[in-house]
Amino acid sequence: MIERKIYNWQQDGWPRFVYDAAPLEPLLHEYTALSGTFAGTNENSTTNDQIKATVDIMITEALKTSEIEGEYLSQKDLRSSIKNNLGLSNPKEKVRDLKAKGAADLMMACRTAFDKPLSRKMLFSWHRMIMADDNTVKIGAWRSRAEPMQVISGALGKVKIHYEAPPSAQVASEMKHYVMWYNRSLKEDYPHGYQAPIRSALAHLYFESIHPFQDGNGRMGRALSDKALSQGHGTPVLLSLSKTISDKRQDYYNALERAQKKLDVNEWLHYFLNVCIQAQRDAIERIRYSIKKKNFWQSHKDLLNDRATKVIKRMTKGGYDGFDGYLNARKYMAITKCSKATATRDLQDLLAAGVLNAIGEGRSRSYTLKDL
C-alpha cells in the first residue's frame, strides 16, 4: 500500500466526487441542443442512410477504442461482424479476426441491452468479448495479481508512474459498490436526461480509478460511458466518444491522470463534456455525409465511366473519415490500372463536369469530390 494519499481512492470521502454544476450548464445546454440537431437530421434521412451511419459509427467506435490501447483490428472483419450482428448479411459474412468480432459483439451488447441494469455478470461477459483469443491475461474475472496495478510510461530505468490502482484484494468490494452506484445514479443522483454526460463522465473516471481487470480497462470504461449516455437519452446513442478521445489522445491521458489524484472533478467534467459535444458534432456530420453521398451518386452516375466509378467508390469507401489524402493522377492510375494519359484525360473530364475540385497546379495538382 502506498503510504502517501496520492490517488483519489486513498482519500477521505472516496468515492464521493465533488463538483460545481453551475459552470457546466453552458456545456450541458450545448450537448442538449446538438442532441436535438442530431435527432432532426436523423429523422430527415432515409432508413438506408440511418443504417449506413449506424454501421459507420459503430465501426469507428470499435476501431478507435482499440487503437487507444495500441490494438489494431481488421476493419473488414469488424464491418462484417457488425453487419452480421445487425442482421444486414444473409448469409452471414465470414469473420477471421476474433478480436474484431469481440469488439463488434460488445458494441451490439451495449446497444441492445443499454437499458438493463449493470451487473458483475454483464461486465465479465463484456470482458470476455473484448479479450477474445487472448490467453495471456485473466479473462472474465477481476484482476488478482499481488503486484501493484500501475499505469506507467518511459524506458526501463526511467519509468514514470502515472497512476496506481487499489490493490487486487480490494477490487471485488470496490466493484460491488461501483455497480450499485452505477444503477442507483440513473434514478437518484441524476434524474434529468440532459445530465447524462455528467453521469457518463463519472462512470468512466470511477471505473478507470478502480482498474478492475488485468487488461482491457480502457475499452470497458468507454463502453460504460456509452451505456450511461444511452440510458440518459432513453435510446442507444449513435456517436463515437473514442474517436474524439483518440484524435487528441494525450489530452485524455493528462485529464484522466489529474482527475485520479483528487475527488474534485470539475476539470475532468469540463474535459469530458467537451468530448461528448465533439462526438455529437461528428455524428451529425456522419449522418449528413451519408445523405450527401447518396445524392452525389444520384446526381453524377450518368457522368461517370467505369474507371471513374471505380475510383470514386474507392474514395467514398472509407465513409466520413474519407480517402487517404487527395486524389491525383498517380492514385487514379494505381486504382484503375490505366495509363497516365488516360488518367489525366479522365480527371480533366471529371473536373469539367463538376464532379471534382482541383487543388494546386501542375504535377502537384490533386482533387477532391466537389459535393462531398
Image (cartoon, helix red, strand yellow):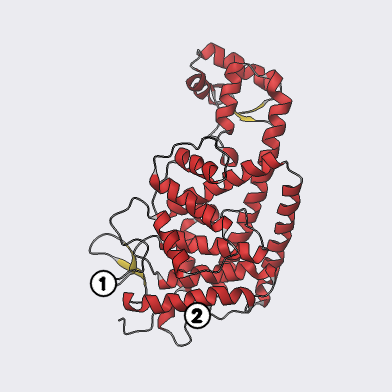
Where residue 204 sits: x, y (%)?
50, 67
Q: Which residue is mark 2?
A: 263
Q: Is residue 155 above or below residue 319?
A: below
Q: Hey, which residue is sitting farthest left in the picture?
A: 157
Which amino acid, mark 1?
A: Glu
Left or right of 305 on screen, residue 63: left
Left or right of 44 on screen, residue 212: left
* Picture residue at 51% right of the left edge, 41% below the top: 79
Left or right of 200 on screen, residue 7: left
Q: Earlier in the sequence, mark 2 or mark 1?
A: 1
- The residues tagged by marks 2 and 1 sit, at their Cα atoms, a distance apart of 25 Å
Crowding near the residue tagged with mark 2, few <14, some 14–19, many ≥20 C-alpha atoms within 10 Å: some
Where residue 219 sits: x, y (%)?
45, 59
Q: Which residue is mark 1?
A: 147
- What kind of element bears circle 1? loop
Which amino acid, mark 2?
A: Leu
* Picture residue at 67% right of the left edge, 63% below the top: 233
The reply to whether discs 2 and 1 touch (Cβ–Cβ < 8 Å) is: no
Quadrant in the picture for residue 124: bottom left
Where residue 336 sits: x, y (%)?
51, 19
**Residue 64 visible here:** no
The quadrant of the image that shows the C terminus is top right
Of the numbered discs in the image, which one, if any, rests on residue 127?
none
Q: Is residue 317 above or below residue 114?
A: above
- What kind of element bears circle 2? loop
